[in-house]
Structures are given as structure tokens and as C-alpha cells.
Amino acid sequence: MLVYYLLSGLQPKSNMQSCSGSFNYFNFSQPNVGLIYALQRAASISADIANGNFGDATNAALKNVQLSVGSTGLLVKIVKYGLYLNSMYSGDFSESFGSDVATSIIRFRKFMKYPNKTSGIADYTVIKGLVTSNGDTGRDSIALDTATQLTAEDVKHFRDYGFSIVGRYLTGTVGTDFKPKNLTPTEIKTILDGGMKFFPIYEDGGYVETYFTGSQGKADARTAIKAALNLGLPAGTVIYFAVDVDLQEGDIAGTVIPYIRTVQDMLSSSIYQTGIYGTRNVCLHAEKAGIGYSFVANMSYGWSGNLGFKMPSNWAFDQFVEYPIYGVDIDQIASSGLDVGTSKVSESSTSKNSAFFSQLQSVEQLAFAYIQSLKGTIPVPREAYPLIAQFNRQFNYTGLSWSALAGTIDTAWLAKANDSLNVSTLKDIEPLFDNVSGIQVDVAHLMATLNALLFLGFPSTASGIQDLGGWLGDLLTAMEKAHQDVSKFTSFYESIYSHIGTAGVFSTEDVLADVDAINLYSNIKGQQELVNGRSFSLIRKDYFLDFENENRFNSFLNNRFNGNSNTMLSDTQILLKGGTGDWGAAYSVALFEFRK
């Protein structure tokens, strides 16, 4: 056992450390218990009191300890082991305190954001931090979290205590009386007006191991993104998904990892970033899986996931003690500075899009008036669809190639519309933000693709030239770039994979525009077959504001490939080679021109 190593003078074997970063290379389940027991005995706590738990007697014995360069004794040796187990020291394990130990202590203080960060002295704060997850619970910090919806008075009290960042829950309730714990727009204003920042936490479950599945991760990510967008949380905000259960080492890979990877996949297609809340061991596994931010539940110092595991290098917040402040239950948190919190919000996704839909209605009315001036009769809504698409694509998608794909631009119409709406550049067209992901929609791209569908009709199996104006054209562009960069990867597959969803090649914005164009056209096609049909502004508004786009990818598969993924695969392969069907040789010519 560890006490044997400490008291016998033997050194640990570095090759016994597990790749997970745990301390369990001493081959028993709770090595820190042995370390604390040795610490207690070295601090002259009698054998009948020493028990491996850092309690009142240990606190009292170590409160005034100050070890520095030149100090000797068993306590020095234990400090060295503690530093080693926290990946902060690689020297000898004698009982002499040298300058290398002081340097390691400074490194540990800075990493953990302990006070006196340039001090190489092993004091109570350092020693307790080396052997327990919660460390010195009396230390100062700038952050806290709470499940209480805050008032201005609460925020003032927090500021008086020296706190400047508060963690708050995006959704849900707390307690048997189901008291709301969700963050609200009014509360956000209260927090920011009171001089504090905040960070969002998502926890609507996660108290049992069986909760953590890939499908649950997808559902939670959708809920969290929607809540964050409705609150106007800005791009780049980290959302921390809670794993509030003490999972054992062997259970994490099959539960938390599929869950959090799915969450990250979902958030990577949004404006938000993924964080995780959990024990040290859970956070270490998540960090290895690619999660960039950890909120570590160090307060639960008795949980197995906090026993014998170092802090993850990506820790942003460190929860270490709970108590009330003027009746509000809080958890005190240390902040590493990796996540500085949110200091401002924007309008909700619905509010941000009001200007776009207002402009869209104006364009539609102008299109009706223009058609009527040419025909002398009142137009039906479907006659305005192509003109609206032209208005939105006019600055980016013109020229001969696009005239062939989407039809020629009616310059007289655009002159009238632009003059009426004071539009002279792309910047004058109001932006649209996706209500599912928060990403700004590439309206020009979407409308150019839609215009191609309106001009040429819906593609029939593997034959549509109009696909070149959308998803197929973007795929070909990505493939070309992937071929150019293939030497940077181990295979062409890895190269093409890296270029899909990447800004500037086949970006997430491109994917959404291509998929949404097919889905919108499918909705429009149904209206075209009616005598009057609905206006384009209503079709568009329903799709983006009534959450039809939540299932956009399934809709795309259904609308373009009859819901058959095998058809999607075979049609794509045929289209990449030259196409078949209705367009015949015309498609091959278009594909050749596109490739040039």
C-alpha cells in the first residue's frame, strides 16, 4: 500500500501510471486515503485517530505548517508524493525540501489558481489541495453557482462577498416543490446590471448512470441550444452539461462519452461550445474525448471519481464548498480564466429575425406590384417566388453559369426593388439567424439554390443539373480542395471529412443553405399546384420560426431522395460520374463546365 512506499523509502515506478491520469497505479482503490493517513501520522496525529479522512484533527494539525527550501522530514516527502501524483513533480522522494520542490509548488499554485501564486512554500492550502479534491475550502475565489433565480439584492450580496461570475441553469426546476431554477431574460439583466457575469449549466437529469446515452445527448443538446438562443446568449458561450453522478472508471466509456460526444456534435453545428460538469475522472475522460471545458465537481470529495485523480488541464471552474449567502444556497467556485463568462446578450433568435421578415414582406409586395404593372392583372403568389429569390442572390450569384442554372436576372425588377428599399450592397439585405443553431443563414446561397430549383424544377433521381447549384456543387468544390490537400492526411477520406463543415469550403452554413433550399422548394412546390397558394414570406416564416427546420436533415432525405439513404448514396455516386436520366448529356456538359 501507499503508506508502505512512503515509510519504506521506496519510490513509485513511473511506468505504473495509467494512461487515464489516475493515481491508481499503486494498485488499490483509494490511494489518496493512504496518502492522507501517512500525512496524519507525519503530523503527529495518533494512530487511533488517523483514519485517512481529512477532518477536523488534520485541519488543526496542518493549519500552521510552513515547509520551504531547507525543510526536512516525512511531511516533505509526502508533499513530494502529492506533487508527483498531481503531475507537478518528477524529482527524488527524499525528505529534503529543495528548490525543485519550491518550483513545483509555484507551478501547482498557478495551475489551481491558489493565492500567493509565486510562493514556493508548502502551506495548508497547498498540502490540502494535493491530497483532497476540494482543497482549502476557506480560500477566496471569484465564482459561484446557484439554483436560485436571483434578485438585484442577491446579486449585490454576491458582489459584496467578492464574487463576479455566477453559474446558472438554463432550464428546469429544483426540489420536491419543483421550484423553477431556469435563467430568465429579466434575471440576466439583473445579473449584468449588478456588475456580474454568468455561465450556463444544463441539467434536466443526469443523476443516474442509465441517463447517459447518445440519444439523450441529442435531446439535451437541442433543448440547451434552444434555451440559449431564446435568452440571446452570444456565439462562443460554453454550455456545461452536468454528469451529477459518481460513475466508476469502467462505466464512463460506455455512458458519458457517447452522451457528451453527441452533445458536442450537435453544438458544433451551432454557435455554442461544449463543456462538461462532473468528477475529476469524468472530466479527464471527456477532455481526452475532445471536450474543451471542464466544470469540476470537486466539492464531492468523497466520490470515487475524485479520489486519486488529478485536475484536468482544461478546467474552467472548480466547485469546492457550499453554504448560504443571505438565505441563497450557493456553491463556491474557483475560476481558471479559461471561460470568463458571459457579459452581454443579444436579442432572442425570434427578435433578431424580425427585420429580415419585414424586409421579405416588402420585397414580396414590390414583386406583386411589378408583375401587375407588366401583366395588368393581379398576380398569384407563386409568380413572385423567382423575383424574391433574384433579389436575395443578386450580389453573389450572377453571371453566365448562374444564368444557366437559375435563370437570367430581371434587371428592371431589381432596379425597382433596390431603389424602393435603398439596397445597393449585400450588407443592405437584412440577416437571418437560424433558430435551431443560432448560425447566420447564408441567405444569398440559399436563395440562389432555391432559384435553380424554381427555374429547372425538382431533380429527378440522379439527373438534376439544379443539384450543381446546391449540395452537389458544394460537394464537388470540397472534393477538389480535398484532392489538393490529400498529402496532409493519411487518406482521401480524412481529407474530404476535414473539408465538410469547414468555413470557406463546404461550411456548416453551406450545408444548411443547401438542405433548406430543397425543403423550402418542396413546400413551395405544393403551393404552386394550388390556384393561389400561400405567399413566399409565409412559407419562409413557417419554416424558420415554427421550427420546421428542427428536422431539416430528415426532411432533406425525404424530399430529395424519397427517404432512402441508399438512394442518396447511389444517386450521389452517379451524379459525380456524369449523371443519367431526364437531362442525359446536358448534365454531363454542365458537370464538365462546373469542374473547369
Image: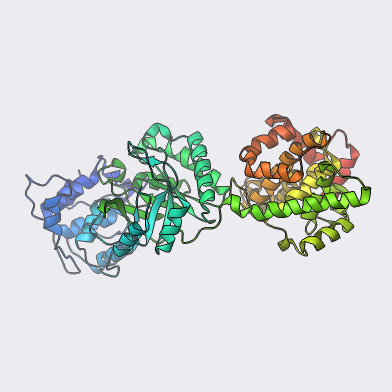
Image x and y of residue 188, in percent: 45, 56
Task: Tell me the quadrant of the picture where the N terminus can be found.
Answer: top left
Q: How many marks?
A: 0
Q: Quadrant of residue 83?
A: bottom left
Is 196 left, or right, of 48 in this rendering?
Answer: right
116 or 9, which lies in front?
116
* Foreground pick, 255 / 515: 515
Residue 368 horizontal/vertical position (percent) = 83, 49
| Whether residue 49 is situated above or below residue 528 in the rendered picture | below
Give how far across and how far down residue 309 sits, in percent.
31, 48
Q: How far across and down, in percent of the image, does residue 430 sit?
A: 69, 57
Q: Is residue 280 left or right of residue 463?
A: left
Q: Quadrant of residue 471?
A: top right
Q: Nearer the viewer, residue 314 or 245?
A: 245
Q: Residue at x 27, y 60 (%)?
A: 91
Which residue extends farthest right?
375
- Whether residue 65 is visible: yes
Camera-nearest residue between 76 and 365: 365
- Left or right, 21 with respect to 30, comes to right
Residue drawn at (78%, 36%), measured in percent from left and top?
527
Q: Is residue 507 visible?
A: no
